């Protein structure tokens, strides 16, 4: 934290105390892949992956006392994520037969675990007070599905087509 004291032009004083804190996050990642080859030209692959939540939180508090005619306080408090990746689960498969491959995956991102940002601004004088609050926003999980097809001909050329669908 930091503290400052200033002399104002009109003869008043301003004393502010600011505290800030950044909390880093760690995210485990685990993945499993299985592959089966049967016959000479048929292959099946299955995969599952877990990505842990990554959340770098910051907290900021600023408490300022201003004295001109009478004491007035100005308070600002904020909590936010400066970087966030949601907890994610992924399941996927691919099947290859000769020159054709079909693949699909499903991703579930847990955005409901994101707490967003909170901001509070308060100002009080001998004539009254004012307060404004910006609450955090509720986020919803997303699910996306992916489907793809690939064809290889004998001349090292590939043709691919794919589609992604995402929930909101």
Image: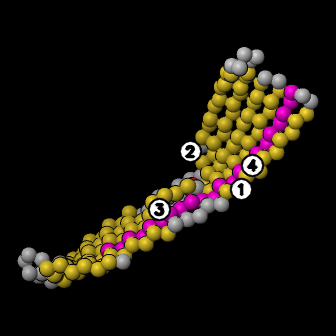
Q: Residue 81 — which label?
A: 3
Tell me whether the residue at label 2 lies in contact with that at label 4, contact meaning CB atoms closer than 8 angstroms: no
36 or 138: nearer the viewer: 36
Circle nearer the viewer, 1 or 3? 1
Residue 59 magenta-drawn? yes
Q: Which residue: 69% across, 43% down?
A: 106
Residue 84 magenta-drawn? no
- Mark 3: few/some/many CA within 10 Å (<14, 14-19, 20+): some
26 or 74: nearer the viewer: 26
166 or 28: nearer the viewer: 28
- Mark 4: few/some/many CA within 10 Å (<14, 14-19, 20+): some
CA separation, marks 2 and 4?
23 Å
Res 8 → quadrant: bottom left
Circle nearer the viewer, 2 or 3? 3
**Mark 2 — residue?**
168
- First in residue order: circle 1 vs circle 3: 1
Q: Which residue: 50% across, 63% down?
A: 56
Whether residue 78 sits left or right of residue 70 in the image: it is right
**In the rendered view of the protein, which quadrant contains the N terminus?**
bottom left
- What's drawn in magenta, residue-wise? 41-62
Q: Residue 30 — which label?
A: 1
- Mark 1: few/some/many CA within 10 Å (<14, 14-19, 20+): few
**Mark 4 — residue?**
48
In this view, the residue farthest toward the right is: 39
Q: Position of residue 156 (x, y in %)?
A: 71, 20
CA separation, marks 3 and 4?
28 Å
Q: Position of residue 105 (x, y in %)?
A: 70, 40
Q: Position of residue 94 (x, y in %)?
A: 77, 36
């Amino acid at each position: 934290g930091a503290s400052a004291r200033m002399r104002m032009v009109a003869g008043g004083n301003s004393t502010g105390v600011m505290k800030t804190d950044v909390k880093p996050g760690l995210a485990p990642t685990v993945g499993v892949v299985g592959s089966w080859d049967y016959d000479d030209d048929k292959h099946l692959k299955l995969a599952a992956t877990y990505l842990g939540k990554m959340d770098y939180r910051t907290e900021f508090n600023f408490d300022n006392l201003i004295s001109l005619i009478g004491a007035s306080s100005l308070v600002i408090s904020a909590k936010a994520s400066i970087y966030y990746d949601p907890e994610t689960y992924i399941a996927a498969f691919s099947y290859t037969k000769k020159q054709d491959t079909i693949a699909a995956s499903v991703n579930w991102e847990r955005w409901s675990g994101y707490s967003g940002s909170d901001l509070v601004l308060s100002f009080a004088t001998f004539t009254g007070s004012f307060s404004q609050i910006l609450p955090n926003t509720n986020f919803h999980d997303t699910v996306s599905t992916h489907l793809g097809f690939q064809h290889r001909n004998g001349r090292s050329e590939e043709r691919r087509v794919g589609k992604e669908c995402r929930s909101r």
